[in-house]
Amino acid sequence: VEQFGSLIQRDSSFAFEPVLQNQFEQLQQFIELSIQANYAIDTKNKRFVESELKAFKQFFDQVESTPLTNEQRVSSIIFEDRNLLVAAAGSGKTSTIVGKVGYALLTGLYKPEEILVLAFNKNAGEELSERINFRLKDILSNFDTNVEALNFHKFGVKVIGKATGKSPSVSNDAGKPQALLNRIIQQLIETDPDFQEKYLLFKTAYLRAPLSPFAFKTRNDWEKAQKRSFDRFKDGFETYQGEIVKSHGEKAIANWLYSQGVPYQYERNYEHQTADEAHRQYKPDFYLPEINLYLEHYAVDQYGKTPAHFGQKYLDDMKWKSETHQKYKTDLISTTFHEFITGAIFKKLEQELKSRGQVFKPRSLAEINAKAQSIYEYDANDLYASFLSHYKSNQANITSLLAKPSLSLRESLFLQLFSKVYQEYDQFLKIKKEYDFDDLLIESAQLINEKKYKSPFKLIIVDEFQDTSQARARLILSLLNQVPEAKLFCVGDDWQAIYRFAGSDISIFTQFERVFGYTKQTQLTQTFRSNQGIANVASGFIQKNKSQLQKIVNAVDKTSSKVVEINFLTKTQEINEYLTKTIMEINNANTGSGKKKSIYILGRYKHHKPNLDSILPFLRNCTFEFKTIHSSKGLQADYVILLGLNTGNSAFPSEKEDDPLINLVLPQPETHAYAEERRLFYVALTRAKEKVYLIGERNSVFLEEITKDPIFKEFIHIPQDEHKPINSNIPAEWLCPKCGQGRLRKITSGPYGAFLGCNRYPNCGYKKSLKRR
């Protein structure tokens, strides 16, 4: 109504036939009256809230150990049909839930049996139940405060049991189906040749989403992205055979040749001398000695074009290589990026190699798995568990997914594999007559919709709503639809939505009104945990993704200068030395305070845990504990040390956890790069009260973003840069003047005399003749 009214006011030149003019004027009058009515309602609501704040001041002062803030009180009082509370980290959302339940009981709005409080998992449900009943039983001693608080799955069991007369059997693998899925995958490998063939191709060539050079506008952007996707501590991608190659495509070719038992050499010197002023000694990408064949892999699309930012030189080099082989009558075949992403590359290679007499000796999957583990290639089987949860929760259909016209080979391969895995998984549960967690949510919603379960709930409160899945949302809607007067109050923080791997869909939170109808949104913007500097870095970083709900976070502790320290360390020994030094400094600085300081050492993965047992006997004034970032959610410490901000395998941000394959089963896929990983980084930062220490590589995508953005300058501290500028070990006169990153070195083999060339060649083609004039 307001939008249409403003449209009419902006464009008063509307003209209608006389017959319609009267109706238009009536519509305009109705809109004006509606706007006035909405204003009157808002005014009345504000007066009501102000009145209730005064009337229940004593209750809100005493309901928790410290008085509730004004934001918490207002959120406790408002009871629109649909309510969303957006709560910053450490802002006291649980206290608000306690306050809202207490206010609802104290005012007689609802009886305890009419209130349902739902939590994300078992522990959260139990903790919430204890907190509500512990805080309310004393302050509301004359009231029944036995409010039901439980997790979604336990509620699903209750609904199914009551509706059918039989409590459902829940699978031991529910919630963590990875082990069962691994067994199914292994069984399919052993019994299904088609599955084994596709699984092997996916593992060797398409385990990670290929990085397309055509997706970048500049060569520099492409090189940065490429470098970030390199295997950890490697200047490229490590193959099963152990060499380091330059692209996903080259790695796929190398691993395919290895898996087929085809001997090859990577970048061996060409058999004829080719070095001149313009070219170094030619090193073709691959050489197959048994059939005397050379292979080049090019960044070329389906139209034979290269990325614009590669420039003319790349095309000239392609032409030169072809002419060189023609000149010396050596055998050359070439493959392209387009052939790689479509999968045509391997059929082409097989045909070309067999036509030349190459003998294939395929290696066993066990041998390939051993090689994959030896180079720390991540296990993609976890991806099946995450995909499974979204597939069921979002009610996806494998036939429809496979029928999508724009599928890449990687997507098609995975869907074909998943289809067989899911059939076996579903059959396993049916035979055992067991439910997984998604089954509990799906069937309980169906029973409620069919009115086989009668809901007594008129107030539904959902905690950690940012972690809600489509199946949970449908369950909530089924309860609301059955009891039209029921009200919904959801609490959470979309900045902390970090359980996509478990089926969560952040769009339900960020587009709450689209799912549940007209909504009153309130916010908790004051954090009692982190100081203002940490809050500014964390909130500034997360809001770079404009899809996240925007808010300003105000900290009680106004400390802001140099509260985030960044250290560029990669070697295990130097990291351990730094950790020891930092922990001892915190310990010594706290001497005589009478209270121990707490330190969380956080990592993206469990294997990031350092061994620091040797310093334990020396700590008197602090404690430290390692946690994964996920397990630290909801907790806090005085100091946080975050490890592993690196690239490659086991990286943070993780390409594995942010795999675009999940987008196939998301109703609204996220478009911002590393969206989920950015939220995980936010969670890590906001565990700290006093200071955060970040440890990783200089080319870490997150560290680079923070260090280069001037809005963070006041809050961060980089000790290394205060003593030694980047590249200070390279004399200024030896830095490449063209790219500013490489180092000049003397080349003496050119036919036109010695010259200086950039060591980043061919990425940088700078050269300067040393010939005396």
Image (tube, rainbow, N blue to C red):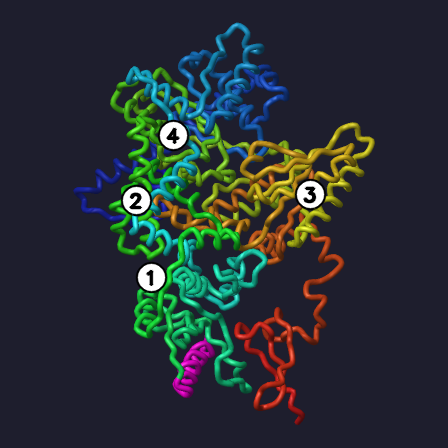
Residue bearing mark 1:
343
Q: Nearer the viewer, residue 78 or 490?
A: 490
Location of the N terminus (image quadrant): top left
Residue bearing mark 4:
437
Name the kind of residue labelled 4 in the image: Phe
Residue 29: quadrant of the picture: top left
Q: How dense is the environment of label 1, judged by Cα within 10 Å: few (below 14), some, or many (20 and up)? A: some
Query: SS class of the residue under badge 2?
Result: helix
Kindly check if marks 1 and 2 are in contact, taking CB atoms under 8 A apart as contact. no
- Cα gap from disc 2 to disc 4, whole angstroms: 20 Å
Q: Nearer the viewer, residue 376 or 156?
A: 376
- Cα gap from disc 2 to disc 3, whole angstroms: 52 Å
Residue bearing mark 3:
560
User: Where is residue 737 shown, x and y percent of the image?
Assistant: 63, 75
Query: SS class of the residue under badge 1?
Result: loop
Apparent side of residue 611 relative to residue 221 in the rendered image (left or right): right
Query: Nearer the observer, disc 2 or disc 4?
Result: 2
Query: SS class of the residue under badge 4?
Result: helix
Q: How dense is the environment of label 4, judged by Cα within 10 Å: few (below 14), some, or many (20 and up)? A: many
User: Looking at the image, is 303 positioned above or below residue 113?
Assistant: below
- Cα gap from disc 3 to disc 1, whole angstroms: 52 Å
Identity of the residue drawn at 47% across and 28% down:
121
Residue 426: quadrant of the picture: top left
Kindly check if marks 3 and 4 are in contact, taking CB atoms under 8 A apart as contact. no
Upstream in sequence: badge 2 or badge 4: 2
